[in-house]
Image: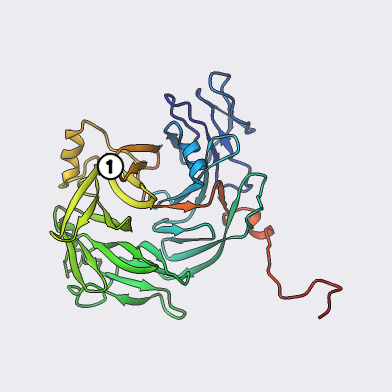
Amino acid sequence: MASKDKASDTNLQEVGDKGEMAVGLQSVSAEAASPASVPEVATPAGSAPAQVAQPPQPNVEKSCSRGLAAWLASSNLSLAISSYQTGRVYLVGSDKLGRVSFFERLFERAMGIVGNAQRIYLGGLYQLWRFENVLRSNEVIHGQFDKCYVPRNAQTIGDLDIHELGIRKNGKVVFINTKYSCLAELSQTHSFKAIWKPDFITKLAPEDRCHLNGLAMVDGAPKYVTAVCKSDAVDGWRDRRHNGGVVIDIDTNEIVCEGLSMPHSPRWANGKLWVLNAGAGHLGWVDFATKSFVPHAFLPGFVRGLSIFGNTAAVGLSKPRNQRFEGLQLDAELTKHDVEPWCGVQIISLTNGDVLHWIRFEGDISEIFDLCFLPNVRNPMMVGLRTPEIRELITFETELQPEGVTS
């Protein structure tokens, strides 16, 4: 369902995962929108409400901060967001009318997502997806989208509880295999190829022993990972959520930070190792000298999914699954700040911790898993599995010479 920030007069445009690309396109003015059978363009703030197409179910409402569309456009940025709880993937950009554009697709248990202007990888329930942009730099599709990501490969890996992903220098993907407590690559023959495991894990077993979850790439190679604890027993991490979390250097097997609460999403940027201390709701960085976590900003939710562009960070926030974050410091932090938990994204300054922009989801979506900035992408779309485009959008490369040309 389309929504907006009433205080900020933010316009949103949405495309849903339906049979036709245009069906489900929604736009919203500053006033409340009402459903209609035919989508119409958003009206200016203060005028009559825009009419919108009936949204796909289940119901999701979105709102954004004032100026988000302008910031995305001026930065030449878009965002890719995954929510495994609902299987949603959102590509968030800015359109020609200065609105925030949400392009939605559905992939079962959408988990880790990483990408750039050319390629996106997405982890799912039992497959790892690769999408390729088929547009050249001067092309648009449907009159508005400057990138069109087409699913070119879905490798069946089985249910590995795949978490975060990284793209190597050579363009290949590496991923956290949480079920088997290891870092892995794709195999031509098997479900996966294990390339590293923590020293405290004695064997590869489908037991999710330490809840290995986050991955930081440095210079196009995997470098740091996060785990909820150092348990070597089946499902042992659940008893260590409060302060058992660690960050590990995979080159040296050294624990470079400990005492964390459910750490996620390590990222190397600006000479620092940033990490989310999810159980306390903090974005911060690792002090290598003391092996401790230095909080930088509090965010009202279970923080998971981090992407850094320049001196700004996009952080995903999730609500609790059972009303409260049982046994976690986050409950006390929310009470201390007198705030309810969010589901959404906050854009944070890495200079002072201020919230620069935000996206908030309400309704049937309550958890964000991962996100990534897409530099040099203004308004992206993704071809869905249930659209005519997946059959009809055909592009090709050739080594053939044009007719009439001879060597």
Which is more toward the observer, 39 or 339?
339
Viewer-closest of 20 and 123: 123
Residue 161 visible to the viewer: no
Q: Amino acid at mark 1?
A: Gly
Q: Is residue 220 visible?
A: yes
Q: Nearer the viewer, residue 377 or 341?
A: 377
Residue in the picture at 41% in, 61% down: 125
Residue at screen point 21% across, 65% down = 210
The x, y position of residue 164, in whole percent, is: 36, 61
Residue denoted by label 1: 301
Kind of element beneath mark 1: loop
Query: Which residue does the image show at 18% across and 39% down from the upper left?
Result: 333
Residue 362 location (% of width, % of height): 39, 36
Classify residue 348 by image quadrant. Answer: top left
Q: Position of residue 168 (x, y in %)?
A: 42, 69
**Picture coordinates of residue 249, whole percent (x, y):** 24, 68
Question: Which class describes the residues within 10 Å of circle 1: few (<14), some (14-19), or many (20+)?
Answer: many
Q: Quadrant of the C terminus?
A: bottom right
Q: Is residue 120 above or below residue 17?
A: below
Residue at 16% x, 66% y is 231
